[in-house]
Amino acid sequence: MDWMEKKNVLIVGLGLMGGSYARALKRLGFHVSALDRDAEAIAYALREHIIHEGSAEDNDDLIRRADAIIFALYPGIFPEWVQSHQHLFKPGARMTDVTGVKSCIVYRIQEMLRNDVEFIAAHPMAGRELSGVQNSDDRIFRDANYIIVPTENNTAEGIEWCGMLGRLLGCGRISVLYPREHDRMIAFVSQLTHCIAVSLMTCSDNTHLADYTGDSFRDLTRIARINDKMWSELFMMNREPLLEQMDIFLQELQNFREMLAKGDTEGMREKMRLSTERRAMFDKQ
Amino acid sequence: MDWMEKKNVLIVGLGLMGGSYARALKRLGFHVSALDRDAEAIAYALREHIIHEGSAEDNDDLIRRADAIIFALYPGIFPEWVQSHQHLFKPGARMTDVTGVKSCIVYRIQEMLRNDVEFIAAHPMAGRELSGVQNSDDRIFRDANYIIVPTENNTAEGIEWCGMLGRLLGCGRISVLYPREHDRMIAFVSQLTHCIAVSLMTCSDNTHLADYTGDSFRDLTRIARINDKMWSELFMMNREPLLEQMDIFLQELQNFREMLAKGDTEGMREKMRLSTERRAMFDKQ
């Protein structure tokens, strides 16, 4: 299926991400349908013209007609959904997902999947602190990084199709990473940062400090508003890489603490110069 | 001295903060002069009309004429400067500063200071990742919190004068905190967050990850571009409160790590719900 043929796209799971995909793809002229067990989410999306069709019940017909499927489900129920519905998939259909962890998902899906369809794992580095289709917004893709996580089971055509989806959404950069390196990267840049933000908010009762915070505290804790069900699932599914990154960070912060305790000003300054230099390179990107 | 009389303001130390004060006060119609040992900073500020007068040499006349003095010096040299120049201060002059730590500064200054002048410690919760008068910008004050840190040596008039300065700069909220509570607060909301940001950048060589970062990593590390001389001085001057806050945070993150290691999903979710609830209150402010 070529994206240019403007065919049927089915979104499975119509929350913040599913809704954002739906908005972007409908705007581009695709026929967009959605399945979600939450009848209110479907009703809202129909009323707001985010989707053309949708159902909160099983609807074999929507699945059978889909040339492309975007899985935007909670990671804990995603493989089961594929297992129980794949007999309905249209031969030749291509499918992808938005899940932030990959190793524990992609092999399992590809192993169970029928041979006449293809699943290419991917996700944009984008989101919001809010959840639900009511908060979906296709501007989240603008200039975001889009990451394709192929395995040896994927075809060159499938990977290209997936990259084209990233471009259609408006993402700024399309990258390819293999599952293991992807999961290490995500443990560091996304999951560890969420653990830090949560711990900053929970480590002491700081609510009376809201009057005094500057931008730095607000920036560090913006992501402390977190969907606890989804993120705990993601953490558990990426437990080993995340534990490894947490340990590396904890050790480094502990070292910094020791330098401060000992009055090792030069040691602290060296760390600050290194962090400044590295962060400046990020800003250049 | 009443701010409304539009008199002479002297900025001692013309870097990012001093320059930002100068811009704001000159725009309001004050006569603004500056002292800085860096002749280029003074020349730049004169050329760009950020100040009316300035000198990189000792200039007794500028000090003698000042009705108000803003100290925007590195904390390490600030008390010495006051000691060696206070014989020049105009009787009745009021002075304040921009220093981010207070206990180790304010008592020392007030103890040495002549009785016919008044020093009221304060600072805005504002700044940039850049330094130097070239990067000064009086928009940093817009909606920022401005904190006055009085002691029992300050007069009601002095405190009011200082709050008026915060309002003139354009700060959104004026608060009053005593030195000890101020320094605990600043250790938590500002210094700890900078330690975390630096450690995130230095804990592993992550420069190749710039392609993949989303907003969360960028937000958490924005302040990792840091003036190493100034921040190491500030950390050392607030060592005990900062060590205490670092230990509380390290323990909390370590606890979260143990929950993940044990697979205590419900424990993690409870922390996430608490952080979400608290952070939502911050957004309301």
Image (cartoon, coloured by chain):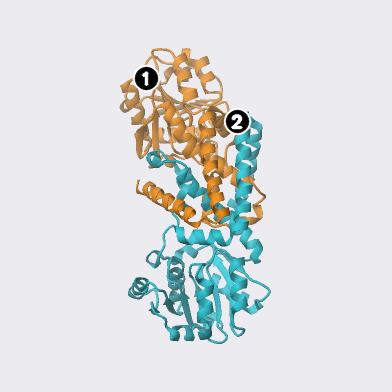
Chain colours: A cyan, B orange
Q: Amino acid at mark 2?
A: Ala
Image quarter of the N terminus of chain A:
bottom right
Output the chain of dot 2.
A
Picture coordinates of residue B21, whole percent (x, y):
44, 33
- Of the pair A237 and B132, the residue shown nearer to us: A237
Q: Are marks 1 and 2 on the same chain?
A: no
Q: Which three-letter amino acid code belongs to the residue tagged 1?
A: Glu
- In this rendering, would A176 be left or right of B280? right
Specify the quadrant of the image occupied by residue B225: top right
Q: Residues within 10 Å of mark 1 (few under 14, many from 20)?
A: few
Quick check: A146 above or below A265? below
Report the side of B154 relative to A185 (left or right). left
What residue sits 36% from the left and 33% below the top? Answer: B175
Q: Position of residue A138 (x, y in %)?
A: 45, 67
Q: Report the residue marked by disc 1.
A: B152
Q: Which residue is mark 2?
A: A261
